[in-house]
Image (cartoon, helix red, strand yellow):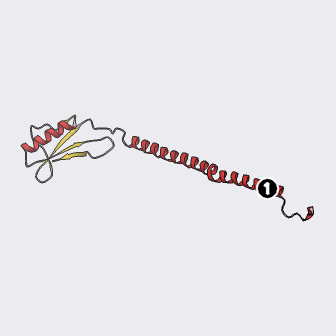
Amino acid sequence: MHKALKIFDWKTYSFTAIAVIGFSGIVVELFSQTIPSIFNTFFKNAGEVVILGSVFIFAIAWLLKARPHNRPKKYDVVVFDVFGKPSQIEGIRTEFKTHDVAWSFMKQYKNSYPLYNFALVSKTPNQRKPTIFKYI
């Protein structure tokens, strides 16, 4: 056989086949593990950042909302007659320093004077009208 008529050259094809198999292995490794692991790591970290950010935003909003409110320093008991008009009953205490004591006295007054209604009110500095806390 003549060299020019050689159709199949084992050396050339074997080197080409080895190069294609080697390159395809690299491409398979690149697209099956390397690139997806980069994206997985990125999105995992991005998810952690989003979750931690929302936790911090919630915590800050909660702290701002749950800060202590200014409690009134003085409570008054206002007496109303049957017609709903403010009235006065002689001999009862109407000014208190704590909410619980004022509420206790209001319940006692309601038992003693069933035809009257009582309101527990307090004047806050930011408002024109007093705030009614309880009404019996």
Pointer 1 local density, CA inside 10 Å: few below 14, some 14–19, many at least 20: few
Q: Nearer the viewer, residue 65 or 53?
A: 53
Q: Is 128 situated left or right of 29 in this image? A: left
Q: Amino acid at mark 1?
A: Ser
Looking at this view, is 52 or 130 the one in front?
Answer: 52
Q: Quadrant of the N terminus?
A: bottom right
Q: Quadrant of residue 59?
A: top left
Q: Residue at x 49, y 45 (%)?
A: 53
In the foreground, 27 or 73 = 27
Q: Position of residue 86 (x, y in %)?
A: 16, 48
Displayed quadrant of residue 8: bottom right
Residue ID for mark 1: 14
In this picture, is 46 found above or below 14?
Answer: above
Task: Estimate the x, y position of residue 10 in percent, counting from the top left.
Answer: 82, 57
Q: Position of residue 115 (x, y in %)?
A: 8, 49
Tell me where residue 126 sits by quadrant.
Answer: top left
Q: What percent of the width, then of the height, locates residue 95?
A: 18, 36
Q: Residue at x 12, y 54 (%)?
A: 83
Judging from the image, what secondary structure is the residue with disc 1 in?
helix
Numbered label tally:
1
Q: Measuring 73% from the left and 52% from the top, which residue is drawn there?
A: 22
Q: Furthest residue to the front?
A: 1
Residue nearer the viewer, 82 or 61:
61
8 displayed left or right of 115: right
Residue drawn 26% across and 45% down?
131
